[in-house]
Image: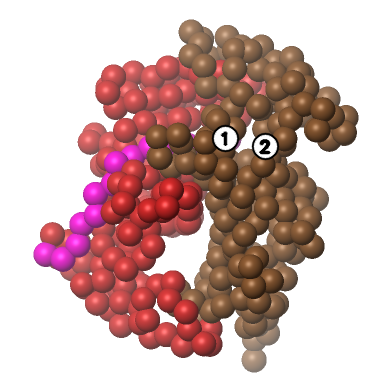
Chain colours: A red, B brown
Amino acid sequence: MTRDPHPWAAGLSSMHAQVWNCLVRGVHDRRAPARHPALATVTPNGLPRVRTVVLRSVDRLAAKLEIHTDLNSAKVSELRATPFAALHLWDEAGHLQIRLEAEAVILSGPEVAEIWARVPDTSRLSYGIAPQPGQHIAGALDYSRKPDPTSFAVLRLKVTAIDVLHLGPDHRRAKFIRCDDWAGQWLAP
Amino acid sequence: MTRDPHPWAAGLSSMHAQVWNCLVRGVHDRRAPARHPALATVTPNGLPRVRTVVLRSVDRLAAKLEIHTDLNSAKVSELRATPFAALHLWDEAGHLQIRLEAEAVILSGPEVAEIWARVPDTSRLSYGIAPQPGQHIAGALDYSRKPDPTSFAVLRLKVTAIDVLHLGPDHRRAKFIRCDDWAGQWLAP
């Protein structure tokens, strides 16, 4: 008999634990699938947007995540208008799609000074692009990069719901919500 | 001197062509990154949602894409309320992030009969899950799958804008929009 490679998919609590194992791995392993989730937001006009982000920190007990971004990026304006985000990732090894719903808080200035102090020099180059991200430029390289702590923002995402789909020999889908303390509920896939 | 592995990133028209090469490959190669883009939508309450979809068809000249889904899935309700979608994919080999904005039309019933006729039997099992996708079930496998053409929907996505980010030794970002015939514009990354 073949050993089940994903025994955690059989139960709600083990499925939930697997989601957080996967997220935590994303912070520590640059090659883990949760390192680069897709972050979806809504524009002030009510349109969907989605882009890759880097997962920087996971607080498993509080169910909170952190992402770093340029304070002048479109995602920050979008989250100012609609402070809700959706995160998506596909873990190929686990055959697992993880979808998160979250409330977003945008932190910048003095409240992120401690985090900025720990950002490596090479990474700091991503904050302080001139002209600002998304502005028109004549040539592809007509921009400069100078680390600027006033351009640095941390998105703190308070996860409110998790929708997980396991595509094993059977398909199993579960939803976990903060307001029932993540007890979990199976859903038709 | 090392040969540039991504010479197409140097110019707007070659960058644009590369996007479509990548999308077309997604339809024909199950392992290509564009096979499984993330599709973002907006709920009737104005919240973002994002999930994996399978790219089924690409019309490069018309800049249209097709995705198949269950007519009873949340994404269909969301697109009925806000008929705009964003698609996202990351092409690791090309170090290329592709983001598409699109208008979505939901087709079903007689208008998709010809497409349904070409869907393989195993794929048809994805349309006609009972209870409907997302409904609560007591056990993980308390659902049945019976192909049902009335549950089959095609999302036809008319691409209106493409935002491309190439993360080579230099970062290059370009935006292409339908209304100027995809001429393209460099953006600060």
Q: Position of residue B73 (x, y in %)?
A: 59, 27
Residue that mark 2 sits on: B106
The quadrant the N terminus of chain A occupies is top right
Residue occupying the point 69% across, 71% down? B181
The quadrant the C terminus of chain A occupies is top right
Seen in the picture, residue A29 relative to B163 is either above or below; the reply is above
Residue B95 lies in the magenta-colored region:
no
Q: On what subunit does the disc labeled 1 rest?
A: B
- Marks 1 and 2 sit apart, C-alpha to C-alpha, by 8 Å
Quadrant housing residue B141? top right
Residue occupying the point 42% across, 57% down? A53
Q: Position of residue A31 (x, y in %)?
A: 48, 55
Tag 2: residue type?
Ile
Residue that mark 1 sits on: B80
Q: Which mark is residue A178?
A: none
Q: Position of residue B115 (x, y in %)?
A: 84, 35
Which portion, as a residue range, is magenta?
A93-110
Quadrant housing residue A158? top left
Quadrant housing residue B39? top right
Closer to the chain start, of discs 1 and 2, is 1
